[in-house]
Amino acid sequence: MANRPILIVDDEEDIRELVRYHLERAGYACVCTESGTEVLELARMMPPALVVLDLMLPGMDGFEVCGLLKNDPRTAGIGILMLTARGSERDIVRGLELGADDYVTKPFSPKVLVARVGAVLRRQAGDEGESAAIRAGELVLRPDQREMSLDGLPVELTRSEFDLMALLARRPGRVFTRAQVVDAMHGPGYPVTDRSVDVHVVSLRKKLGAHGDRIETVRGVGYRFRE
């Protein structure tokens, strides 16, 4: 991953250059584009380590780009950090549900952005290191392939849903606060509301079907996976 560049996508040249300047100062190689369509082509030809993605792009917006990248097996493992002026809770939740790893709003601090990029890349490296299959009865998660099966059938999860499921299933019986869930999925200090964590849990329970009650709510605290 260390040799793969960071792909910066923004239709404003001054923003692209600002992000590129600070990331290159931090030691990262960068490639820039203003086109959502070109992101898909570049990501499939030479997968970057991370995409810094604006939402308001001409032609194909960042949400659509994110969804297409995360639903393509060739690009699903690429990290995505959304960098945008759209900072409503609705937009943040939508971005995370589509599989974005982080969400930074404009105007932004370059130092904070570089720190967030580093956090996403470290989490990805940790994901690659924790590759052993997680088995909990009829539930099997394969972190190296980012796949989950239930009763032998595949279950499609977003990146955030998979990270949440892996966090809970690795430590059955342990209670995780919402803050701990956010820290594990996005890194310390990530500005996510309790509601966005609850949205992921509700979606995950639906996908687990009859097994959804294995994710238990601990009132006033957080969540745990029932053994």
Image (cartoon, rainbow, N blue to C red):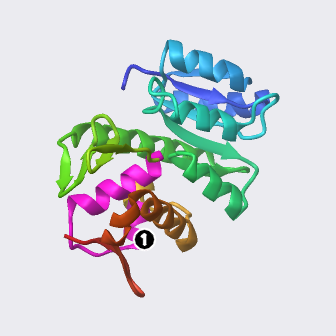
Q: The N terminus lies in which quarter of the figure?
A: top left
Secondary structure mainly formed by the magenta segment: helix
Figure quadrant of residue 212: bottom left
Assess whether residue 36 is covered by the magenta stretch: no
Q: In the current view of this chain or complex, which residue is farthest to the top?
A: 45
Image location (x, y in percent) of residue 62: 69, 37
Image location (x, y in percent) of residue 148: 32, 45
Figure quadrant of residue 208: bottom left
Boundaries of the magenta span: 158-183
**Is 34 left, or right, of 127 in this rendering?**
right
Which residue is at a point 51% across and 12% down the rendered structure image?
Answer: 45
In the image, 67 versus 123, the foreground residue is 67
Which residue is at a point 22% across and 43% down the rendered structure image?
Answer: 130
Q: Badge 1: few (under 14), some or many (20 or more) residues near its Cα, within 10 Å?
A: some
> Can you identify the residue that label 1 sits on?
179
**Is 47 left, or right, of 15 in this rendering?**
left
Assess whether residue 163 is covered by the magenta stretch: yes
